[in-house]
Image (tube, rainbow, N blue to C red):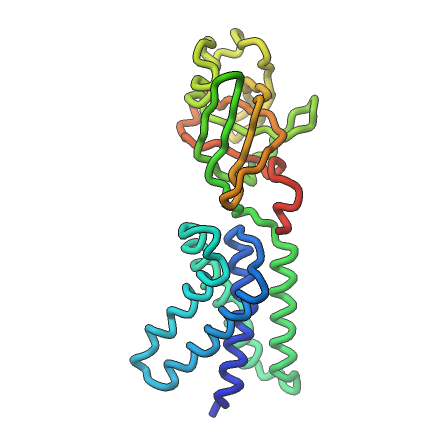
């Protein structure tokens, strides 16, 4: 028979591991200490409900989205929804690992030592794991008197860099470029580029290509709901790119964004 105090302590410890790890997987910064402790305590207490009555099991399931909301509500509903899914995966990861180790008959290793090991592994993951899922939703570009705000996504496969300046290169669709340069000729025609453009040689799955590239007067990326200035160049994709999103390279993130 599991003691009630131990059961609550185990589930609280699991929340302490899963919530920061789920937030990291969702590209969100670590939650505040007070919010994390409150959410973990709530999860530990709610885990008792199924033991009291099986009909209360659905109520206990509210501990996960409730804990995520307590820790990450300031990032908005879409971020919390995404974080609920990643925290659920993190719970399966840590809980499954703990159960497997306990059922493997590795006595005399104390269960407390196993919990400490899993907690350390979760801490290392939240510290070292790159935030490849940073919540970048928009990019603002300005060239002269013209400006455009585009939906955007962080593209970990975009490794483009300008060989002259060493800056990262953002890729936008040609329809967006026409908004910034309404009186320019066809920007996909590399033989008739406007003043200030040059060519960037890129290699894709389809082969090599030359993309027109320019330096915007203003570039802002909206990272986790906050506007951040970015130093980078902008390449115009060819007609084969039918998307509307700007493809943001990892190198365009502000310093510290990957570890926050």
Q: Position of residue 254 (x, y in %)?
A: 63, 40
Instruction: Give the image quarter of residue 220.
Output: top right
Q: Position of residue 83 (x, y in %)?
A: 46, 56
Q: Is residue 9 above or below residue 177?
A: below
- The residue depicted at 66 percent of the width and 87 percent of the height is 108
Q: Nearer the viewer, residue 179 or 248?
A: 179
- The residue depicted at 48 percent of the width and 62 percent of the height is 87
Q: Nearer the viewer, residue 156 or 33?
A: 33
Q: Nearer the viewer, residue 248 or 229?
A: 229
Q: Is residue 122 above or below residue 164?
A: below
- The residue depicted at 66 percent of the width and 42 percent of the height is 255
Q: Is residue 151 above or below residue 77?
A: above
> Going by the image, does 88 lie left or right of 156?
left
Q: Position of residue 253 (x, y in %)?
A: 60, 39
Label tally: 0
- The residue depicted at 60 percent of the width and 25 percent of the height is 233
Give the residue furthest to the bottom. 1
Instruction: Give the image quarter of residue 109.
Output: bottom right
Q: Position of residue 130 (x, y in %)?
A: 61, 50
Give the residue furthest to the left. 55
> Going by the image, does 248 lie left or right of 175?
right
């Amino acid at each position: 028979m599991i003691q009630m105090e131990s059961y609550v302590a185990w589930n609280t410890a699991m929340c302490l591991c899963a919530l920061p790890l789920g937030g990291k997987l969702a590209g969100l910064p670590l939650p505040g200490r007070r919010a994390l402790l409150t959410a973990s305590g709530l999860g530990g207490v709610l885990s008792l409900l199924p033991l009291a009555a099986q009909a209360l099991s659905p109520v206990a399931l509210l501990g996960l989205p409730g804990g995520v909301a307590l820790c990450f509500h300031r990032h908005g509903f879409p971020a919390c929804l995404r974080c609920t899914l990643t925290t659920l995966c993190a719970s399966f990861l840590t809980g499954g690992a703990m159960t497997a180790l306990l059922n493997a008959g590795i006595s005399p290793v104390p269960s407390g030592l196993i919990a400490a090991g899993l907690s350390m592994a979760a801490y290392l993951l939240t510290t070292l794991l790159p935030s490849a899922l940073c919540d970048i939703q928009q990019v603002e570009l300005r060239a002269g008197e013209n400006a455009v705000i585009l939906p955007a996504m962080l593209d970990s496969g975009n490794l483009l860099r300008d060989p002259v300046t060493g800056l990262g290169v953002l890729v936008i669709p040609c329809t967006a470029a026409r908004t910034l340069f309404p009186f320019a000729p066809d920007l996909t025609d590399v033989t008739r580029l406007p003043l200030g453009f040059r060519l960037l040689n890129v290699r894709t799955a389809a082969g090599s290509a030359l993309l027109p590239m320019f330096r915007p007067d203003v570039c802002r990326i909206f990272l986790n709901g906050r506007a951040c200035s970015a130093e980078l160049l902008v390449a115009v994709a060819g007609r084969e790119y039918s998307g509307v999103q700007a493809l943001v390279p990892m190198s365009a993130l502000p310093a510290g964004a990957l570890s926050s």
